[in-house]
Image: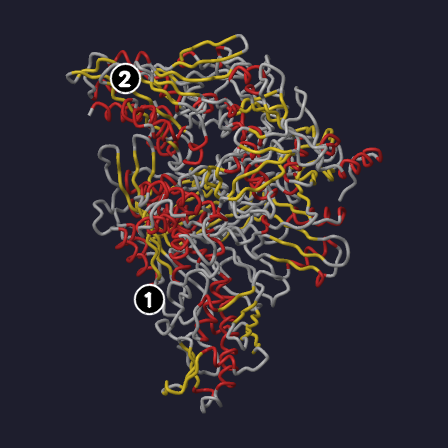
Amino acid sequence: MTSARNRPEWGSNDTHALLNSDIPRVDGPEKVTGRAIYTHDIRLPQMVYARLVVCPYPRAKIKSQSYRKARKVPGVVHGAPFKEVGDSIAFQGADGVVGAIVAETPEAAAAGLCGVKIDYEVLEPVVTPEDALAPGAPVVGRRGNVTGLSSSGDRAEVEAALSECAAVVRGTFRVPVQHHVSLETHGVVVDYRGGNEATVYFSTQGVTGSNREFASHLDLPSENVRVVAHNVGGGFGAKFGGGIEGRIACELALELRRPVHLMLTREDEFLMAGNRSGSEQRVIAGASRDGVFKALAVEADRHGGVGRGALPTPPYIYSVGNTYSEIRSVHTATDSSRAMRAPGHPQASFAMESVLDELAYGINMDPVEFRKKNLADPVYHRQLDRVAKEIGWLEHPHRTQPGVPENALAVGIGFGVAIWGSRSRDITVVDVRIGPDGSVLAATGVQDIGQGARTLVAAIVAEELGLAAHEVSTDIGDSRLPPSVASGGSVTTGSLGPSVKDGAFNARVELAKRIAPMLDAEPEEIRFADHRVFVEGDSGRSVSWKQACASLGKDPLQVSGRFQPHLRDQGIHGAQAAKVEVDLLTGRVTVLKMVSIQDQGLPLNRMAIRSQMNGGMIQALSFALFEERVLDKKTGLMLSGNLENYKIAGCGEMPELVAIIDDEDTREAVMGMAEASNIPGHSAIGNAIYNACGLRLREMPFTPARVLQAKGGMS
Amino acid sequence: MNTFDLQKPTSIEGAAALLPTSSDSRQAVLLAGGQDLLGELKDGLVEPERVVNLKGVAGLDAMNWEADGSLTLGALVTLQSLAEEPRVLEEMAVLAEAAQQVGSPQIRSVGTVGGNLNQRPRCWYYRNADSVCLKKGGTHCFAQLGENKYNAILGGGPTYIVHPSDLAPALVALGASAVLVSPRGRRTVLLSEYYLLPADDGITRETIREPDEVLASVHVPVQRQGMRSTYIKFRERGSYDWALSSVALCLWMSDGMTTGARLVLGGVAPTPWRCESSELLLVGHAVDEQTIRRVVDEALRQAEPLSDNAYKVPLTKGLVTRALQTLAS
Amino acid sequence: MTPDDRSPSEQDELDELSGLSRRSFLKGAGGGVVAGALAGGLAQPSTSEGVVPQEASAPGASTVSLSGRHQIALQVNGEQVLVDVEPQTTLLGALRHHVSPPMTGTKEVCDRGSCGACTVIVDGRPVYSCMQLADDMPGHAIRTIEGIGTPDDLSPVQEEFCRFDGLMCGFCTPGFIVASTACLEKHGAPDVDTIKRELSGNVCRCGTQTHIIRAVQAAGESGVLKGER
């Protein structure tokens, strides 16, 4: 049900016919039948397949190279190096791309790759922070191996405060480098066959404007290059620009004048498509006997390879009396970090939530109570109480001291909280067209990376017009459509939603104007619901949706929607709890249950929000138990560069998940929420391990090896 | 993957005749289920001119119960059919449980007994084509001083791989033997003698199988009455993973006393690791706390962990404890 | 692109090769070309110059040898499909790149049998199509995602995936649907532990696993008998 106003409003959260309910994905049937086409799936006449020649070492010099044998492989149409003999590779990742093979088939390209012979002089790899900080270490970045040092607070004041604390915790917290592992690897299909135009199929989180980057590579006017991303197989922050693979594909297409399919292999993806930076955080923290977090000193290193890495400034979410912090980037000759779901936050969360927990137990205080005492925002209080109740904390036998395991099995519960800005951008334009046949099309350049953008567009329009979501067609994922926002940092909902709402509102108002004379009413009296258009207070004066649209005559009704700042808000919280079982005989940590609560203003699609929350918990579980990039310290060779060795959680690891939408958030505005649900899960798991058995694991992942090491059960 | 010719002989002798006489994987490699070999080909660990495909040999996928109650498994019996065979489930739980826990359903649909027993190691350095390690004809075992959390704690040196097979510990525990066919004829060897420690000429290979030999079948003898058995596999990732450590245990008990035992460890040594001295400590005793402690201590007595895998010692002790408690209860 | 190491003569050679990229070439120990059937399947030269099944010399007198590009017949979703492959072509590669039109519903993710995105059903069992040589497939019944429901006529488990949101980006989804279908056909109405075990060879990164498990359970409980499709 919608009412006439002079500007679009969401209305209160309990007045929606469609929004704020479970709305199945409109593209679900395409995806569950394998009909959805991704960049990987693009097939074009005369298309060739490119494979990159990638140096496996972080630092090396090319002693000799030959592509002769590769070019003789039947089906290979091109094979050439990008670097000369004597050239150096300065770091693993983009600089390690030393050549390319192009062939008629993927098999021929792979066989061609086998024929490339390169002899490298392997240089000191600089893959660990210790390597980078060692005296005389090769300099990795232009500005040295340590950059970006920032400090805040007064160390002396923190020291003074610590001396008065009842509990003081000292610990070094280590988070390994994690990979995004989008199941569709990075890559493009560049359809350029000579001439003045090109189409680029691109697995990206940001379609709008990406044509400019490819146009520059192809030396074409940007309006002559069209970028298409109808479906994207995951991004998680790593898929914005076209990268070196995008540039090379363009160059190959220019040279060969044939469509070039260049998708990274899984191995390449691990080597050069980004990662979540690791960190080492050396922490001293203190609390008073009555549960006040008095003092905190943090020295932290970001491990972003040749990139900067990310880490928010302490004390992160909590209120602390005195804080001193010193953060820097320590650079290794490894692939640059990229944004990954809530960049920096899971790392900060791990150290802060662990310290919080240690302090609480240090003064024999319930860690939930301790958190609430040191969180000013009351939203956190209600959220922590809710997850504590749901996970069974109130009945849990040991809340202020860890448990004493029986039969080597121990059960524990832990907590963590989240924060996210959920900002938005004023960029999206949405075209809405209503046809005389009753069809509705909403078009904008946004991309669906799995967050459900397509469904969100359809549902908002359907709500406004009294239709079902699947009755609204959408056209998205194309740079020639009206502009929209790149999907990163949970900005999509807040940036897209208001424009869609505005477009739908304009369409409704315009249609009402056309219908009003038919129903002998004023346009302001016209309402849309349940496939009918009627006069408010007089349901007898009504026409069906189809009849209403037929009155448009020959021409469709076309309007546009633009960003309306009052329709979005920002700033969200979130809390999670985890219940684990620790097997002290084997070191196995089994996550039994996780609970997440999330506020986000108007929950546009409750099902999609629960999916994001569950996805956040599952990724956190996977990060907590398994994920870690491993490089050989002597050579820098990547040892974890496949899905066998870089392990992500499978169905067997799935706990009971409870995703709670915080309906006490009554803001009549929209904002994204995904990042927040990725932040505290692994911290809650680490805290649950301690609560179970008294083992405090300060390094992730929490593998059986680490549990057994911590237990000191070595013989 | 490089280009190769695919040869499909129709007899086991024909297959053996197509294999090289020296250990030169550039000439030809043997394909059974392919779940290991295709990975090796894709990773460029082997770049053969020819792949000899055993699937053209009729009858190699047969599972036969002999009149005496023993079992003959053709090399191409799939892991899934082994895992689901009712008599195996009933009479040789250790073997069924091992087969059930190999890889994933998709692997078990296709993976074979022969392939599982002859698969190559998963050591990170061995599997990295750019790492010319000792196992691949290089000069150093990089795992020894490198990243070795999954490597051997027993029987290592000069290489430190662990044998990745789940079936092998179970079959060794059952006293199984393998039939090998070559142009020189056929021979039968106990599986307990099939695998080679690195120090016993097992550096670039894991078994005594000659380059031109084909493992045609495995024979599992009939077991003494009253056997209880189990296979416990511990995976870092429960869903789908290799064993960090595994235990194959067969136990015979009478009046609360152990009358016989076979204990074989997987995932901790370059071969299935038989613990004969531990078995002896079990015989004649009740499976009580004290006996269990003596048995597990003895089983791991010779363990020499590397920098990152000492956890495998308590882990394996824990698993042996669980296996003994399970079968004795 | 930076200058490469090609000399002019190499370039000529390259141009020549590129024109011949689809050629097949004769190889093998034996003599005459066998144009007949492979064990359980069909193999034919794809071109008059092309080659193919060969007889090796004794003792493998009946050894078939495949070399270079050749044609095989696959039984996909109940239909015979002729496809040009090479010995190293995997079933996944054949489906995605060589059948016409390409069947891209089956996804390539890890290419090493670690993730399940390429799962197809062969003779009733789930397999990783990336770990199967196409040449081993003639004579076997292959079912792919394209053979399990259409957007307008979803299979029961596909409907439940949509209902429980068992998908987000959708890239793992076809593999999960196929593995789930195999699971349901085998177990009828599986319990949660069985579902977890049967789907343990598939991974999802967006984090839809719990929804998938619920969807498969619901599809089983809906009473649609196994083997319906």
For numbered disc 2, what is the local secondary structure? Answer: helix
Name the residue located 60 percent from the left edge and 59 percent from the top edge: A207
Query: Chain under label 1?
Result: A
Quarter of the figure that contains the C terminus of chain A: top left
Query: Chain under label 2?
Result: B
Circle 1: residue type: Glu
Q: How many marks?
A: 2
Quadrant of res A265: top right
| Residue C148 marker | none
Circle 2: residue type: Val
Quadrant of res C9: top right
From this viewpoint, is residue A664 visible? yes
Mark 1 and mark 2: span between their CA atoms? 59 Å
Crowd rating for badge 1 (residues with CA inside 10 Å; few <14, some 14–19, many 20+): few
| In the foreground, A658 or A335 | A658
From this viewpoint, is residue A81 visible? no
Q: Answer above or below: position of C66 versus A621.
A: above
Q: Which residue is mark 2?
A: B295
| In the foreground, A509 or C89 | C89
Q: Position of residue B42 (x, y in %)?
A: 58, 32
Direction from residue A299 to residue C72 in the image, left or right: right
Q: Answer above or below: position of B203 versus C159.
A: above
Q: Answer above or below: position of A349 versus A113.
A: below
Spot the residue most to the left: B255
Q: Which residue is mark 1?
A: A664
For numbered disc 1, what is the local secondary structure? Answer: loop
Direction from residue A711 to residue B21 in the image, left or right: right
What's the colour scheme? secondary structure
Quarter of the figure that contains the N terminus of chain A: bottom left
| In the foreground, A413 or A639 | A639
Spot the residue most to the front: C36
